[in-house]
Image: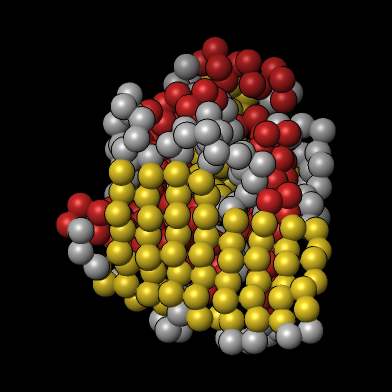
Amino acid sequence: MSTLRFATFGAGFWAQFQLAAWRELANNQCVAISNPTRSKAEALAKKMEIAGVYSDPAELLEKEQLDFVDIISSVQSHYRLAQLAIEKRLPVICQKPMTETFEQAESLVRMAKQANVPLFVHENFRWQEPVRALSRVLKSGVIGEAFRGRIDFISGFPVFDNQPALKTLNPFILMDLGTHILDVARFLFGEASSVYCRAQRIHTDIAGEDVATVTLGMTSGSTVVCQMAYAGTPVECEAFPQPLVFIEGTKGSLELGPDCTIRVTTVQGTKVTKHLPPRYAWLDPAYAVVHASIVPCNADILNALQGNGRSETTGEDNLETLRLVFAAIDSAKSKEVGNV
């Protein structure tokens, strides 16, 4: 099978891990990188042995022979960079959130469809090993029909230390973390029909909200509550960046706890299993479970690029996650239940 050549847009905190994850897979090669600050692109290119370095993405697209692009830059740049690639008929992989507004996301999905260009979103939380294992148990029917669920991501981890730009985002947690958590809700429970959200800002030096509680009414009839917080209060960080999940079913309960532990409780008793992620030499131990999830997420997209099936995280699918995100943002402003 031929090697697919790609370029990366962005040389920030996540780019190094994304590129390292690509190297765990065969038949792909990053041949160029672009970043507005050229020195950052040069530094990452040297570290990752990437030949082409640019500060102008249009120049990169003009000069390089590519099979796809991987956008790992700030959300403000996603729409324009994806548009440039689509105009060149190049498949696009975009970091979440796909765009700054729902209208932009709709436009991008429509643009890609009209051009017959594959569009993917790098939504990796659903690819965390414990989340995949939880889904398998849920789908097995051992706890019957799920009627209520809770997904928590409440962390005292100092997220702004590694990503200070997050302080300027408004909305913040619903866009940065909500895209992950609401996608996990869809992955586990299906689609939602209603959204109610309350949001708060605890940090005094940030622009957006750092706490959000989202209640989803699912089309299946179940209720799912998503609790998110980067409030910086002294709570345990042992689960970061793994979500905690509790699901009630008609025949039992299912829990994803810290340290990738799954507990299944039925009338037969409680069964406990552990589902640790692979340990790669390049990952940051503080982000181990999410950094490891980049590999299977990339593999799924690469498989689709090679014509071997459909990826889970297409732009079209992620549009439904963003629909929930922006419905939650609107609900937090209006303090009313929104329909989706």
Q: How is the image coloured?
A: secondary structure
Query: 54 or 42, which is in the foreground?
Result: 42
Quadrant containing the C terminus is bottom left
Q: Position of residue 268 (x, y in %)?
A: 79, 84
Q: Which residue does the image show at 55% across and 53% down from the upper left?
A: 123
Give the residue at x 45% y 49%.
228
Q: Quadrant of the N terminus?
A: bottom right
Q: Residue furthest left?
A: 334
Please say if 101 is above or below 113: above
Query: Looking at the image, which is closer to me, 287 or 248?
Result: 248
- In front here: 58 or 250? 250
Answer left or right for 56 relative to 202.
right
Q: Residue shown at 45%/59% (left/top)?
A: 226
Residue 291, percent across and down?
68, 41
Check the image and report above or below for 20 versus 11: below
Query: Where's residue 20, x and y in %?
Result: 72, 35
Q: Is residue 173 visible?
A: yes
Is 52 positioned to the left or the right of 319 in the image? right
